[in-house]
Amino acid sequence: GKVSLLEYQNWLSYAFDRMDANRDGTLAPEEQPGGNGATLTREAHRMRVAETFKRQDRNRDGALDTKELAAPPQGK
């Protein structure tokens, strides 16, 4: 009934892993939609996802319930 941070990161890393054509753990600009953007490491991606998770975890219990998952993240 709830999603942990690790589950959330793993699910949202699916697209990263699909785009990482050379499997080096880094998205180069040419691997990203539109062929541009800053280079992004898998670790930096997971940290961004963790920040989003934290903003969505409104009751601060370390997990997201269905209501929290459905709501947009709150401001920084």
Image (tube, helix red, strand yellow):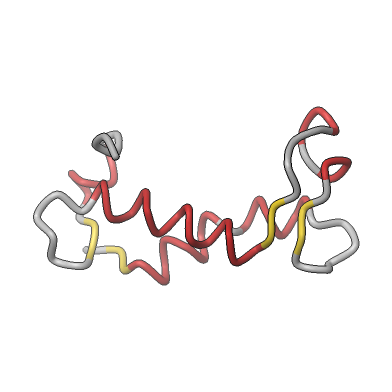
The quadrant where residue 25 appears: bottom right
Q: Is residue 55 above or below residue 35?
A: below
Residue 3 image position (x, y, % from top left): 30, 64
52 horizontally vs 42: left or right: left
- Residue that appears at 48% across and 53% down: 48
Residue 39 image position (x, y, % from top left): 75, 49
Q: Quadrant of the N terminus?
A: bottom left
Residue 47 image position (x, y, % from top left): 48, 61
Q: Is residue 52 above or below residue 32?
A: below
Q: Quadrant of the C terminus?
A: top left
Q: Is residue 75 above or below residue 16?
A: above
The residue positioned farthest toward the top in the image shown:
34
Q: Nearer the viewer, residue 57 or 65?
A: 57
- Residue that appears at 71% across and 60% down: 17
The residue positioned farthest toward the left in the image shown:
59
- Residue that appears at 87% across and 56% down: 21
70 horizontally vs 41: left or right: left
73 horizontally vs 40: left or right: left
